[in-house]
Amino acid sequence: MSMEKVGVFVCHCGRNIAGVVDVKRVVEEIKKHPFVVYAEDYKYMCSAVGQNLIQEAIKKYGLTSIVVAACSPSMHLETFRTVAMNAGLNPYKVEMANIREQDSWVHEDPYEATEKAIRLVWSTVNKVVGNQPLEKVKSGVVKRCLVIGGGIAGIQAALDVANNGFEVILVEKSPTIGGRMAQLSETFPTLDCAQCILTPKMAEVARHPNIKIYTLSEVIEVSGSVGNFRVKIRKKPRYVDIEACNMCGECEKVCPQVVLDKDFNRSLTVRKAIYIPFPQAVPSAYVIDAEHCYGVGTARCSECVKVCEQNAINLFDTEEIIEVEVGAIIVATGYDLYPKEKIGEYGYGRYEDVIDSLQFERLISSTGPTGGELRRPSDGKVPKKIAFVQCVGSRDLQHLPYCSRICCMYTAKHAFLYKHLVPDGEAYVFYIDIRAGGKRYEEFIMRVQTESHVRYVRGRVSKIVQKGDKLIVHAVDTITGKPIEVEVDMVVLAMGIVPNTKEIAEILRIPIDENGFLQELHPKLAPVESPIKGVFLAGVAQGPKDIQDSVAQASAAASKAVEILSKDYIEKEPLVARVNKELCSRCGVCAQLCPYNAIEMTPEAARVVEVACEGCGTCVASCPSNALSLANYEPKQIFSMVDALLVQASAPKVIE
Amino acid sequence: MRILYYPGCTVKATAIRDEKASLAVLEALGFEVIEVENWICCGAVFNLPRDTVIQAVAPIRTLIRAESTKSKHSTTNILLTLCSMCNHVLKMADNLYKNDPDAAYKLDSYLTDEPKYRGELRIMHFLEILRDLVGYEKIREKVKRELRGLKVASFYGCFLLRPREVAIDDPEDPIVIEEIMIRLGADPVDYPYRNECCGSFNVVRTPQHVWDRVKDIVESAYDYGAELIVTTCPLCAYNLEEGQKKRKAELKGCELPILYVSELLAYAFGMDDVLEPEVRSILDKMVGSRE
């Protein structure tokens, strides 16, 4: 260390720093540091001239380390590391002292600010002399991607990755891909039929040579890290051979067990225990609902087996655990509607004709239980008056504090489609305000309000009560300021949406936000990256969004995944934790706390998977044996920094 | 179990029927009820503006006196209330004192003539005591005369259920009265207006609002098959009674008797002597006709 020759470069950042901090004095004072052989200031160190100046000084004075006193390292550390490398210096012998965000921008007194700058720079010099020259960490990449969730976001992401020439494993927990979008009738604002635009994509996934679909499957374990994840998938038995089933439907005809179709048709109709969720399901094969089938595991009934000419049915099918290695993961687990039972005042569960938005989609869908004719569940009558209630659960501090984003638009679509199905019907929409912030969205709302004569009432609904075969909607019209009562035949609740993330967030250790959505790395600048390297987010799992945005985000996530998969090796910062094997007692505390799954327990000691480690230091702080340390943040360096920050002021303050 | 009891003004006046039946029922269930000494009116409404605490003075004074009564008669810390409004006001005042140090300081300053409030009481409505301390099954054991098939519409009103912090049950889907009625052998009616406001104090200044609401409530209960309405709130009971008289023409004969929950309990327990003769004859007619 005695050989260290440190150069210090103090930036003015125009007036940003120099307006408060006396940069000349910082230069003079830091020259007193025993390791500093050269110091100077310049107006903009990040400019080409400034960079050149640093390079020249490194060469001229044979500097072994440099400190740039300027802005936050998140702004320009890479710039100055490159400068150092070009001058033949190891980039990890470069540090920045932040005298802008942490000093000149937050202090007014020039004297105090200058004193603080001197300490910050001195402390950074103390650190840099202890830095080891390091090399980036490298590791290989498994050229395969895991996509979790087979809704529109997962489908799009899988196709994009596969079309880039990489293998994709698509895992879906239900018997078919397609997700929520497959349940929808039409899509806003263009009114394309949802299945017409979705099923071609589903078919493309089905026949794509690079995509392997696992339905009725869930990811149960993920270990390893970016480039080399090891994944365990639990595949539940389908009892029907996908390859052999020719969809003749004979099995369904003979099946004696009639079951409420809770999933696809949301309890509006029944199906058999052997069924296909919808005709265009992918994979295109029947499935047995083990919960309701008499014969599973016992062959007591076996009617379906008897009629199946393909011999496709195996009532003794068993669960499988599949292990795969992947280089990147895309999470697109989608959403559920907020449980209506939690909103007692709207009478869901009491009144058959109070339904949720997805039930309405099924009722008006041509593949739905009524074949696209709108008939209310209680008595099959066509509702002549209908009320749509927006923000049910959403934007309500007792339920979901956030806006679910899609309800204004789909409610407008519902009202529009209602008026087409029942031209002489009357439709009311109760809303707080209309959020139509998308391309051609506002125009669509205007079209519904004017052309279709849907009555928009600004106000919340307080209660829905049943009177005879009518429902009475109690609400307030906040424009007239009067409470109103509207008698209708049917009510559609625009339920808020909640993410399906609880299990997957735990398995992948992705943090979730206060509302259960997966947390992105940065809300603006890294919206598809999760804090776990190599894990990307798409669709509603990350936040409420419509089909357009889900598809866009899925493509973005796919391109991020491809960025990793297309590399021959992964390169990352070497500022990682290290284990002193002699001190490690293998207690495993570090491995449990590591937010990045970067610590593995070996028979000898904890081992840091360098390529996954982010250098956060959690393990270092948690280790009861002090067996862990962080490269270039050794205790000696930290203490020398603290010492520099706590010394007496270099000169007494002049009182004017 | 020895518990404290705060009657409040209405229970001692227009709703004395409720007190007689409630206290008899509690005695039968093994409670010894000690009335708070020198209690005063609760104020009957808890004002919501944050900048005044004056209306919490009376209820806190009563609570202080309840604490003194507790020490004197060595009762448990349970304070029974019968009236929904008293229950609401005492709980709201107690919450205010415990959660807002500034309000507590002001209240202490108003109440220098009393011992300091210790906040050690557990204020419980009659229904909460039946549910949480007695238990539905024990009620069932005491039944001597089943109210078999009696179609009862429970009317909770608002003060038992709102705001959420002092609610005795789920404000949107309460169940406690129905649970009790089932144990008495009755057949509760699930109608949508059971947790609505009856109109409350508007009966003083704009009674027509109250009569309109009462009409909707009674009509709905009737449509759903109710033979009578039960409540625990004296003001609800008054409004429902009066409203039916005022809207007799529109109701077209679908008026329903308004009784207290306690009266049905007393009747089922076979304690005819604590019931008013009219109440007994109503129930005799309804229950007897089925026997």
Image (cartoon, coloured by chain):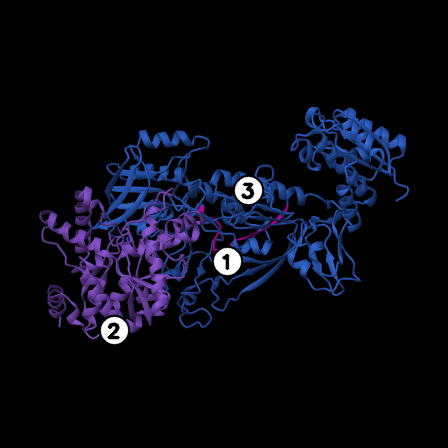
Q: Which residues are magenta?
A: A166-180
Q: The chain drawn purple is chain what? A: B
Q: What subunit carries mark 2? A: B
- Secondary structure mostly seen in magenta is loop
Q: Amino acid at mark 2?
A: Ala
Q: Quadrant of the C terminus of chain A?
A: top right
* Dot 1 or dot 3, earlier in sequence: 1
Q: Quick check: A461 left or right of A31?
A: left
Of helix, strand and loop, which one carries label 3? helix
- Whether A440 is drawn above or below A370: the answer is above
Residue B173: image location, x then y, percent: 32, 56
Q: Amino acid at mark 3?
A: Ala
Q: Which residue corresponds to mark 2?
A: B28
User: Quadrant of residue B188 in the image?
Assistant: bottom left
User: Residue visible at 48% across and 41% down?
Assistant: A545
Q: Residues within 10 Å of mark 3 (few under 14, many from 20)?
A: many
User: Quadrant of residue A250 in the image?
Assistant: bottom left
Residue A329: image location, x then y, percent: 61, 49
Q: Which residue corresponds to mark 1?
A: A216
Cα gap from disc 3 to disc 2, whole angstroms: 68 Å
User: Residue visible at 49% across and 50% down?
Assistant: A177
Q: What subunit carries mark 1? A: A
Q: The chain drawn blue is chain what? A: A
- Whether A656 is drawn above or below B100: the answer is above
Residue A7 visible in the current orientation: yes
Q: Cβ–Cβ below 8 Å for labels 3 and 2?
A: no
Residue A150, which numbered label? none
Q: Which residue corresponds to mark 3?
A: A554
